[in-house]
Image (spheres, coloured by chain):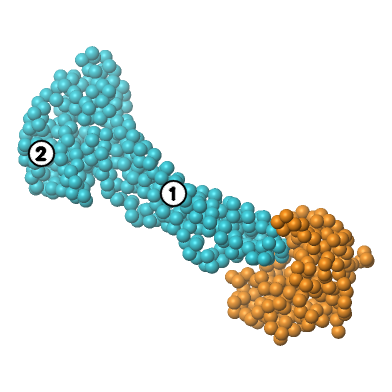
Amino acid sequence: MSDTSLVRLAGVSKGFVKGKDAITIFERLDLAIPQGDFVAVMGPSGSGKSTLLNLLGGIDRPDSGEIHIAGSRIDTLSEGQLSQWRAATIGFVFQFYNLMPMLTAAQNVELPLLLTRLGKAERRTHVETALKIVNLADRAKHYPREMSGGQQQRVAIARAIVSDPELLLCDEPTGDLDRASADEILGMLTILNRDLGKTIVMVTHDPAAARYASRTLHLDKGHFEEKELAA
Amino acid sequence: MLKQIVAVTAINLKSIPRRFWLSLSTVVAVALVVMVLLSFLAMSAGFRRTLASSGAADVAIVLRAGARAELNSVIARDQVRLLEDAPGVARDAQGKPLASAELYLVVDGIKKTTGTKANLPLRGIGESGAAIRKGIRLTEGRMFAPGSNEVVVGKSLLREFQGFELGRTVKFGTALWTVVGVFEADGSVFESEIWADLPVVQSLFNRPNTFQILRARLSGPDGLAAMKAFNDGDPRLKLDVKSEQDYFSEQSSQTSDLIQKLGWPLAIAMAFGAMAGALNTMYSSVASRSVEIATLRAIGFGGFPAFVGTLVESLLLAGIGGVIGAVATWLIFDGFSASTLGASFTQVVFSFRLTPALIGQGVALALIVGLIGGLLPAIRAARMPIVQGLQG
């Protein structure tokens, strides 16, 4: 396990209690993801893929073990510290886009910048740049309901990258899209990884989506298995 | 932090149309609470103002010792004569005391709105009776002629009761009386009265040597004290002397306190219902926004902006309800004329009065409903686990 990894999990355990039963998701899980990697995480339902993503994003806490991301040990941070850390370090892309329906594309993309010290003009410049990267500069004033699913997911990607985070966490980013739109989104993630150097962890059920990643981890019964590399 | 709060609050408020009917029900519930409260308070304020404006500080009232109202009071002619010459009583240019011994009787009237019988005050007043009171002006006709069966009526009484129009003949006891004038008295309680010449009233109602009250204009700031000292020092006078202002203030406080004591508990009971409604609305609001709240939290927004945003939404809905309730009460009740039994078991006509201070109380109650109704849902919004929220 390299100390230069962007993401490092050491002996992470996580479980939950359902009724009288204690259910284990991971038991002493280790993981290292180098900077600039594009990792797809696959596995059967209930294997803990989304829980892993939540732990990496600091929106859930492990029962034990250590999580180091971008030089910070996050499992010991307070809620307030985690919020600040997420704002600076993580970009989330969700399956159902999770855009604010009452805000325009530009206003949605601007949201993470409200957590920075940037002024209004600088925020506008950053938003325009992010929307250009996802080829939606001409849709800045459109509301989510006026856009297709693929376009909404591109807005969500713009929101995820606008504050220039080191790590993008994508939870089934193509799960709600048709094949053509899915390929477009995956191509965009590939560009973000290759050209902008973003480290990406993507949870997916779709083997075709996983092929866009540089490597795929299979999570099953609380353990990883690295099965194949992307073409 | 301020930018976060503004952004989250704006997102909350912009999402209200998605919960339009539920939000509207909260607004309406709060508006009804405020309407109930303000209608009682406006009633109380109107009654208090009517009686308060009736009393002058420079007019003394004399009643039998212990009598709280004119109807319970009796003053003998000898006592009247002694008091007319008491120190502290002002005199006119001819040197005659500015005092009016009066007889107060209850006669029947019919309410225009309900057609039901009601007690009306017939007051026999002395020569100086109208002059002693402040703000008396004849708006129609003329003053009654001494020694005649003529009456003048207050304009509130004319408005609320049948058969007192100028020129009409009314029957009190066994005698017929002609209405020869209508007067106003700055909205005071006197506008609810019928006035006639004292000797005629005494004669026709067979009360030749009986009076119930003596009103006297005071000669100066020390006049009341001088009159009281005179009364206390003469064993023939077992009477109470007080200022007209104090007399009406005592009368108004009893009834207006009663109205307020009915109004506040009723409004508070209703407020609990509205609070439950607000609580339900805001819990639903938080539930329907759970994905949005969790997404913002995942992006890096703190829990406090979610707390403030939810509370602002609750306060806004309740505040809108409060303003609607206040405006509706003002439109419906401000200036609304009503009558109730006064301390002498006769009708006092008064107008509901909605003051800015009362509106402030109504809106404050609405905001309290909003604050308490929104507090727990706001805490839930702030503490909602992000993972749970993202699952919707």
- Quarter-of-image position of residue A164: bottom right
- The reply to whether callout 1 and callout 2 are in contact (CB within 8 Å) is no
Which chain shows up in orange? A
Q: Are marks 1 and 2 on the same chain?
A: yes
Q: Is residue B342 above or below residue A218?
A: above
Q: Using the rendered image of the protein, determine whether residue B152 is visible from the camera's viewpoint.
A: yes
The answer to whether B48 is drawn above or below residue B378 in the figure is: above
Q: Quadrant of the N terminus of chain B?
A: bottom right
Q: Residue furthest front?
A: A20
Tell me if residue B306 comes above or below residue B220 in the rendering. Answer: below
The numbered mark, 1 or 2, whose residue comes first in the sequence reads 2
- Rate crowding at label 1 as few (under 14), some (14 to 19) or many (20 or more) other CA atoms within 10 Å: some
Residue B215, can we see it?
no
A116 on left or right of B174: right
Q: Nearer the viewer, residue A210 or B63?
A: A210
The residue at which mark 2 appears reads as B172
Mark closer to the observer (1, 2): 1
Q: Which chain is cyan?
A: B
Q: Residue at x 63, y 55 (%)?
A: B380
Q: Residue furthest right?
A: A2
Residue placed at 21% from the left, 51% from the top? B113
**Front in this rendered view, residue A60 or B94:** A60
Whether residue A58 sits left or right of residue B270 in the image: it is right
- Callout 2, which amino acid? Phe
* Residue B231 point in image, percent of width and height: 25, 18
**Quarter of image, res B102:** top left
* Neighbour tally class for label 2: few under 14, some 14-19, many 20 plus, Cα within 10 Å: some
Under circle 1, the secondary element is helix
Q: Quadrant of the C terminus of chain B?
A: bottom right
The subunit letter for the residue under badge 1 reads B
